[in-house]
Structure formats: structure tokens, C-alpha cells
Amino acid sequence: MILINLLPHREAARKQRREAFFVSLGIAAVFGAVVATGIYFWLDAQINSQRDKNTFLQAEIKRLDVQIKDIATLQQEIAALRARQEAVEDLQSDRNLPVHLLEEIVRQMPPGVYIIDMRQENLLITVRGVAQSNERIAEFLRNLGHNTPWFTKPELVEIVASSVSLGPRDLRKVANFVIRVQMQRASAVSASAASAPASAVVGQGARTASAPALAASPTASVALTTASGAAAAASAAKPN
């Protein structure tokens, strides 16, 4: 016996597929909404966390800025204290400079050279004097530049030929000169003495305590001799 299905089975299958599609679509929409919601909350949590980190970093930056300002202030105070310390050390070392000045000038001055006036401005020494000849002045310059660690950069400012009268008919030629020389501080002398052989600086400062009155003044204006030095130079040059 042949059975024939007269029901609309194709429409029923199509309806069944349509319902399955809508169910799947709803499930996908719900799943997508859940995923989107989860991503939203996760991103919101990340943003809030980053904001908290930024707030913390800004607070730390402000605190560090205050510390940096304090450190800068401390560095300025340290620099000021070091400058004061160096100034005090320079003052202490400069107390004996006039003693070393007079000692070294006398020690390096060759025969036939006489000093009329000597002035000190800070560490610049100006020497005025008279010599029997230009060779004596050149020897004096060499001694100041090479034979003592207390002087550096000697400079001949001027030299003027003149004559001195020893009598009505006795005139002697002399040379008036002006020399500038830079004096070294005790710290610089000690540094050069440490690098040089010990024999080159033996005897330096042996008489630093012999003139306490001179050590009290940082600026010296000393007149060692008067114009009679010129006459003495001329008389020393007089042949026997």
C-alpha cells in the first residue's frame, strides 16, 4: 500500500530552520552583549587604574620637585660655605705673603740693583728701582722668573736711562726701571713644591716668623730705599 504525505512538510522544515536561526541569532546577540559588557568593565577598570597611577606619579613628582629644590638650595649653601672656607684659607695663607715678598725680593736681587719703591695690589707686585746697567735688570728679571716659586710672569714695564751726579764734575749713568711680577699663594707654592724635587724648595719660608708686623697687612707699600740708592748705584759703578 502506498502512503502519500499530503502535509506541507517543506514549509514546516523551513519554519523550523527559521526558528533555529533566530534562536542562534539571539544566543549570539546575548553572548556578544556579555562580551562587550565584560570588555567595557575591563577597560573601565584599566582606565581607573591608570588614573590612580597617574595621580600617584603626579604626587611623587611634586614631592621630588620639592626635594630637588631643597637639594639645589643645599648645593648653593655648600658652594657658599666652600667659597667662605677658601676665602678664609686664602686670608690665612696671605698673612705671610709680605714676609715671603720681602725675603724673595732681597734673595733674588743681584748686586748693582737698588729698589726705590715697591707696591702690592692683591697679588700684583710693582717694583721701581735703579740699576747700574741693563744687564743687571735682565738678571733680576731672570731670577724672579726662574729662581723662586713665589713669583711668576715677571714683566719689564719700562726702563729709562738717566744720570746721577756724585759731584760737580762726576756724572754716572744709571737705568731706572719698573717691573711688574705676579706673586704666588702659599697653596700654589706647595703644589709646585710637591711636584718638583725637594732640593729646589729647601729654605723657602725659613724666616716667615721674623716680621710679624709686616704679616698683619695683606697690601704692602714698602719703600726699601730712597733716591740715595741711585747715588749708591753710581758710586758702586765708579772705577777704582
Image (spheres, rainbow, N blue to C red):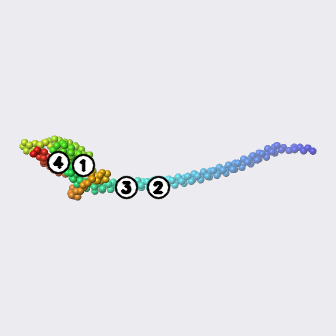
Which amino acid type corresponds to the residue marked 3 in the rendered image? Ile
Q: Earlier in the sequence, mark 1 or mark 2?
A: 2
Q: Secondary structure at mark 3?
A: helix
Most distant residue in the top direction: 161
Callout 1 amino acid:
Asn
Secondary structure at numbered mark 1: loop
Pointers 1 and 2 in contact (C-beta within 8 Å): no
Circles 4, 2 touching at the beta carbon (< 8 Å): no
Q: Which mark is residue 63?
A: 2
From this view, report whether residue 161 is shown above or below residue 119: above
Q: Which mark is residue 78?
A: 3
Q: In the picture, residue 75 is in which quadrant?
A: bottom left
**Which residue bears the numbered disc 1?**
147
Can the viewer see residue 234?
Answer: no
The disc placed on residue 111 is 4
- The residue shown at (8%, 43%) is 170
Tell me the SS state at disc 4. Answer: loop
Specify the quadrant that holds the C terminus. Answer: top left
Q: Give the spatial CA distance, label 4 vs label 1.
A: 16 Å
Q: Amino acid at mark 4?
A: Pro
Of residues 127 and 46, the one drawn nearer to the viewer in this rendering: 127
- Frontmost of labels 1 and 3 is 1
> Furthest residue to the left?
168
